[in-house]
Image (cartoon, helix red, strand yellow):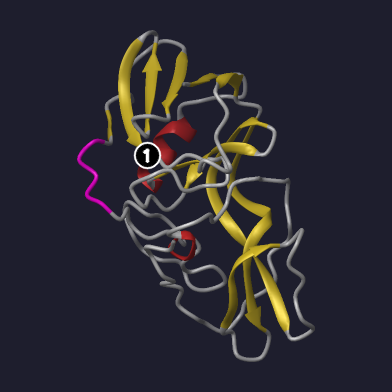
Amino acid sequence: MERFRSTLINYLPISVLAAVSLSSCGPSGPGRSDYLAGVGGPVHQQTSGGAGHPAPAIPDDVSYWDGDSAQGSPLIKINRGQQKAFFYKGGTLVGISRISSGTEDHGTPAGKYKISQKSKDHKSSVYGVFKDRATGMTTNDNVDIRVDKPMPTEIFYNAPMPNFMRINGGIGMHTGYLPGYAASHGCIRMPHHMSTHFFENVQVGTPVIVE
């Protein structure tokens, strides 16, 4: 079932990341290990992937942003069929981003929502990796802390979700790995540069339509 195997780079552990508000999105199915690349280690300097997230698996000839000088109220539309997010200001389309939404088993529900929280340096309190305390080597790269329990020799590192924009319970938009298809546990992953544009141009209360 897996198309993409782990590209995690093992480093000596740093301080344990504290769990924060619940996010139901995380590594899921093919590509899950790439999504967590760099957790617990130095920041990856990748323009489109962002910290801890490698660049998309396929060339991104779709994403663009032209909304810095545009005026009007923001609106985001998520098209799951096209795997794209559309950003409008005052009814004018000013940006498009490739996305990776939820899998069939962990779908991103359709509906009309509003952004209820913004968290620039968000981390999942549910998903992440286990690393060996002594060596820093990854021992499990697909952890659901509600189910998986670390051994006394292991440390849990929370999955990074930069530019998190919560829309429905634990579901939100954020920087994440894009394998080229729906692959998350429900969240809407974006390239880092696009999640940054979206994050900087929305407020709590901005409407989001998932189709």
Front in this rendered view, residue 175 or 211 = 211
Task: Kindly identify the amino acid type of the residue bearing the numbered disc 1.
Answer: Met
Image quarter of residue 117? top right
Give the residue displayed 76% in from the left and 81% down from the top: 151
| Image location (x, y in percent) of residue 39 | 54, 68
Residues packed near mark 1 inside 10 Å, few (<14), some (14 to 19) or many (20 plus): many
- The answer to whether residue 69 is magenta is no
Q: Is residue 58 visible?
A: yes
Image quarter of residue 16? bottom right
Query: In the picture provided, is 35 more to the left or to the right than 204?
Result: left
Front in this rendered view, residue 79 or 63 = 79
Instruction: Residue under label 1, please give it.
Output: 194
Query: In the picture provided, is 178 more to the left or to the right than 39?
Result: left
Eyeballing the image, is 147 above or below 152? above
Give the residue displayed 48% in from the left and 72% down from the top: 42
How many marks do you count on the picture?
Answer: 1
| Image location (x, y in percent) of residue 127 | 64, 58
Segment tinted magenta in the rendering: 58-62
Give the residue displayed 33% in from the left and 47% down from the top: 180
Give the residue displayed 25% in from the left and 51% down from the top: 58
